[in-house]
Amino acid sequence: MPIGLWRLFQSRHASELIEALNKHNDSLNRTNIQIVHNIANPTIVGVHAAYSSLKDQEKAAQENFSAGLPKIFRELDVTIQDSAFITSDVTNDPDNTTMGKHEYVVYTGGQVKIGTVADQIAIAQKVTELVGPELLANGIRADHIRSLSGVPMNRIIWRMGFPTLDGVEDEITSLQSDGDNEVAAGIREWLSNMDTLVRGVFKVRRKFGSLG
């Protein structure tokens, strides 16, 4: 199963951190890394790494250490806000046709009620079948992501990649749960299974390349 690693960092030197992380990953010929910068709180930087397995991730972690990543974090006063292994259970882009084409990413999710993760995945699958093709036609990718580790672990999130900021604005200002259609009903059911809900809007500062 493909596996991801999501890490959220905070630093007063976020721009320098992004530059250093890009140089670090370039030096290791990494194409499986996406770096994002929170546009509401510019001290926050997110890194999403995609791996074929945990063995692949462990090897990359050792390379990071040897290449001086801990020194970068010390020098730029970086604190880790979140770190978790993740997986995508549902996507509207299984062939990765939008890979490397997004300028912005929106994360919407939080803690899910214990025992309802399978229900949430089923709802996400149904909603994606209804709206996923239209989103993809507009260059928008939607993934329903589940935490495999972290504190807390009972978290799920919608990750949506957008080619334009206008698309982001349309998404975050719309009341998609309002109405009597099947999509709105599914979103309301999904929301009813959540204990908390947060959202972050990020500018992409390093794009995914080949994941092969």
Image (cartoon, rainbow, N blue to C red):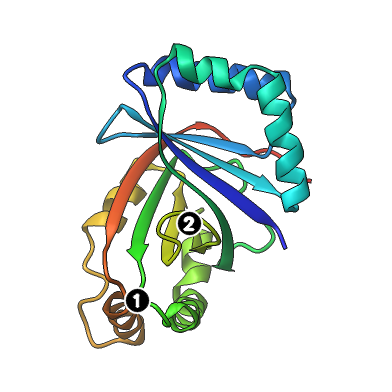
Is 192 or 77 nearer to us in this picture? 77
Location of residue 22 (image quadrant): top right
Question: Callout 2: few (<14), some (14-19), or many (20+) C-alpha neighbours within 10 Å?
Answer: few
Location of residue 34 (image quadrant): top right
Q: Which mark is in front, 2 or 1? A: 1
Sequence-first tag of 2 and 1: 1
* Residue drawn at the location 35% of the way across and 58% of the way down: 108
- Amino acid type at circle 2 is Asn
Q: Horizontal placement of 139 versus 42: left or right?
A: right
The residue where tag 1 is placed is 113
- Amino acid type at circle 1 is Lys
* Residue drawn at the location 45% of the way across and 73% of the way down: 131
Location of residue 49 (image quadrant): top right
Q: CA distance from mark 2 to mark 1?
A: 32 Å
The x and y percentages for residue 152 are 40, 59
48 relative to 26, above or below: below
The residue where tag 2 is placed is 138
Q: Horizontal placement of 202 versus 31: left or right?
A: left
201 relative to 39, above or below: below
Determine if residue 30 is in view: no
Determine if residue 155 is in view: yes
* Residue drawn at the location 57% of the way across and 63% of the way down: 88
Is 206 or 112 nearer to us in this picture? 112
The x and y percentages for residue 18 are 48, 22
Element under disc 1: loop
* Residue drawn at the location 49% of the way across and 77% of the way down: 121
191 relative to 64, above or below: below
The x and y percentages for residue 134 are 48, 67
